[in-house]
Amino acid sequence: MLGQFEHMVLLVILRQGSESYSVDIVQELEAHTGKEVATAAVFVALQRLREKGYLKDRLDEPGPDGGHARRYFKLTPKALHAMRGARANYLSLWDGVETQLDGRGK
Amino acid sequence: VGADEEQAQNALAELWVVHVKKHGAGSARVWYWRQVAGFVLRVWMFRRRQLPRNADSGQMWGSGDRALSEGVASWVRAGARVVRQAVRSLLRQPGFTALSVLTLALGIGSTTAMFGVLNGVVLRPLTYENANELVVLWPETVTNMRAVEWLAAETRSIAAMAAMSPADFSVTGDGPGDRISGARVTTNYFDVMGVRFRLGRSFQADEAEPGRSNVAILGYGLWQSRYGGDVTMIGRTIRLDHVPYTVIGVLPRDFRPLEEHHQVWVPQAVERGTTVATDETWWMQTRIGRLSAGATVEGAQSEFRATAGRLAHTFPEEIDAGSAERATVLRLRTALVGGYERTLWVLLCIVGLVLLIACSNVTNLLLARAEASQRDLALRTALGAGRRHLLVQLMAESLVLGIVSGGIGLLLAWGGIRAFRIVAPSELPRANEVAIDGAVLLFALAVAVVTPFVFGLVPALRAARSDVRGILAEGSRGVGGSVRRVRLTAGLIASEIAMAVLVVTAAALLLRSLSNLRSVDPGFNGDRVLTFQITVPPDPADPGSGPDMSTYRALWLNLAATPGVEAVGGIHILPLGTGNNRYPYWADDHSWPAGSPPPAANIRVATPGYVEAMGIEQVEGRWFVDADRIESPPVVVINRTLAARLWPNESAVGKRIWLLDRASEPWQVVGVIGDVKQMGLARDANGEIYLPHDQWRWAAMFATLRTSVSPASLVPAVRRTVAQTDERITISRIAPMPAILRTSLATNEFVTGLTTVFAGLALALGIIGVYAVTTYAANRRLSEFGLRMALGSSPARIIESALTRDLRPVGLGLVIGFGAAWMTTRVLSSMLYGVEPFDLIIYLAVAAAIAAAATFASYVPIRRATKLDPMIVLRPQ
């Protein structure tokens, strides 16, 4: 099972195309949620996802301007499979109940 | 999270920039610490969850060698990672790294080079077999051959005893004549020294008998240079002092003679049936012994004193009982290099102080750097790096610094040792053995590994201790940095200045002493004097009467006629040279109580032209003239010191002196000349008696030529003149007198020069330290300065108060330094001439110089800081 935050991180990586860098993930998450994201949470999530085999990573060469070496993350086929499953679960659960949100809780 | 630590730091740094742009610095700072706190919490939780899993797997696989080797491998991997990270971290700050490495390399390099010298000269064992068993016996006296035999037979703690007397020989035949140094020795000499011969054999006992003693052993150098390494040398005949000798042995290349320039050895013959009383070989200068198994030097000395005392008791006429009572036994190593051991250790201590100053500087740099990277460090701690991990990482950086500096320092030491072998004074024993060997490499490695703990441990401990809360509490930067850090820095500066004071004072004392020595009047004017040694063969008509004096007279005349020569003289031992002749004497108006030995004076054999050629002052009476021949009445000239001692209130001219024997014919004093420094510039003149060459015929004389041109330019003409006079005359040791003067100061100049170089380094490093710290402090106080100026304080007031604060540790350092100098500079006293170890003027001068340099080094950065516009300074805060 994917945790919610993990799911979000994977989605951001998917949205960003082939590879993602931690800072971009944090910024994209903040842009989508409109809230401050704990950088630490992203790092812990990335670490855990990597352990589960959902992510592959590689260390980039340091930039020519003397910058540090960045670590890039990439989804594995296993991750895509898990996301597909999670999406299907979410969609089937949501099916027919979206309208109920409008009336309640406002 | 380990390797991600750096990623996290970099990510935060990037995001920080974004936040500052979007929300301003204040909000960004709050955001930053919230993020750090997030890391603390999440990483801690993450680790807690992971721990049990690791423990399980450990149990599952955790037995046997495999776990062990995996453990080792993981340690190696971890070590490699730590080192890689240290290197990367150092490369990120090339300025800091370069400055640290340069500072440390200078310190390590000079220390290693100095250790190399000490090692080569003093520490490395002598190259003789079991050299530790070799001792020098009774070096204070000369004995004859029979006395050596007597002592050897009676001293149980000495397994074998040999004796040696230096002797110079003219070697002729097989090419141009040459003068070489060598020694007359007892036949067991090389057996006692434990030498394996390159060719041939050692002397046999019966070769000390007259008539069988014309055998010679060649040194490797002479064998190579004169005989081209001819392997058929054994059995060949060579001529020493015009007498044929059969070569019986050649020494190995690595044999180091007791006196380095010795190249040939012959047995000292001793008449059959003589005793200590009747043996005439009273010139055996050096006695070498090998300790019996289990004997100690101290035990041997007390036994030897008793034996020497019995010898003096048995032969009271010949052996002085007082000297026997005080006879010493020294380890050979001590006898050879003992005089330099202390000096070299002192120099090593001095250069060690330079290294400590370098370490203090690097410590200061590390402290400043740690402060600048506090955020990174706090974050690393937050990321769970843990104190130990952080400590390891920081110490790894220091170790990398130390090792790299050690490598560069070793290169510097290599260059330094090469330079040393060029400038080393010629009288320094074993200077040619100084090289970078295993011991020196080990020393450099040890220094490179130990110094990181000296300079790096305190900053690392401090940095590792600093916790997130502490830094959060300090928050935005305060005015002066943490109190503890300021105190630490002040302490470092004080100790740097104290050490610099110590080294600079030592150098100043030595420089003063050297300048005193240089202004000493040697008693002669040698500016344009050329000297060389000549040996004239004996008169064929009467070989026992010394050299052929008609040849000598012809030589003096021919030399005087050589263009460019103004005056020609001759003396048997040059001033400021090595060697001396002292004879007991009796004089008119003086009697010595019976039984007490008569006083002794230096004896010099000289020619009529000597005083003029050397420009020595004629105080009274006359100098020798050509008419002072063997057939005329014996005359002497004495020096001012002896005249003042013997006849203080009257003229010495006309008085009589007896030499060697009260019953001999007296010598009449015909003149008094000025004192000449015979034994070195630092030594006061002794009583001296000059004898005319014709009345005391000496075979080997030093010619002294006063020239109208540069002395060295006359060498070819002089060689021609000598060869034309008589081709059997040998000529050697050619040297202009100014060069001899310089050589006599060589050791002083060497020690002073080295100390001055070290003092320059110490001073430069100390001042750089003050400058760096003041610059750093001034930059931290920019806002304070700005605020005070905005409030109307004048720059002068600000500079004054900042200077007072920054110079307080300098003042403390000066006080401590002078206290230390006062306590320790007395170790220099044996190296000082005409200056006391505590010389107030020098201390004040050093204090003024260091205080001025430190003030300047502080003033510049403070002044620069006050020049900035206060509004600009205040804005970013």
Image: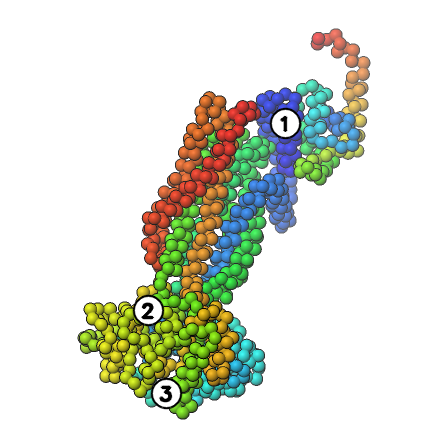
Helix, strand or loop status at disc 3: helix
Judging by the rendered image, the residue that carries numbered circle 3 is B545
Q: CA distance from mark 3 to mark 2?
A: 32 Å
Quick one: B183 or B608, which is closer to the camera? B608
Left or right: where does residue B797 sit relative to residue A10? left
Read off the chain for label 3: B
What residue appears at the point 48 percent right and 57 percent down from the top-left corner?
B114
Q: Amino acid at mark 1?
A: Trp
Q: Amino acid at mark 3?
A: Ser
Helix, strand or loop status at disc 2: loop
User: Of callouts 1 and 2, which one flags the residue occurring earlier in the amino acid sequence?
Assistant: 1
Asked if marks 3 and 2 touch (Cβ < 8 Å), the reply is no
Counting from the top left corner in percent of width and height, residue B550 is at 40, 86
Q: Which mark is residue B617?
A: 2
What residue appears at the point 65 percent right and 34 percent down from the top-left corner?
B7
Same chain letter for marks 1 and 3: yes
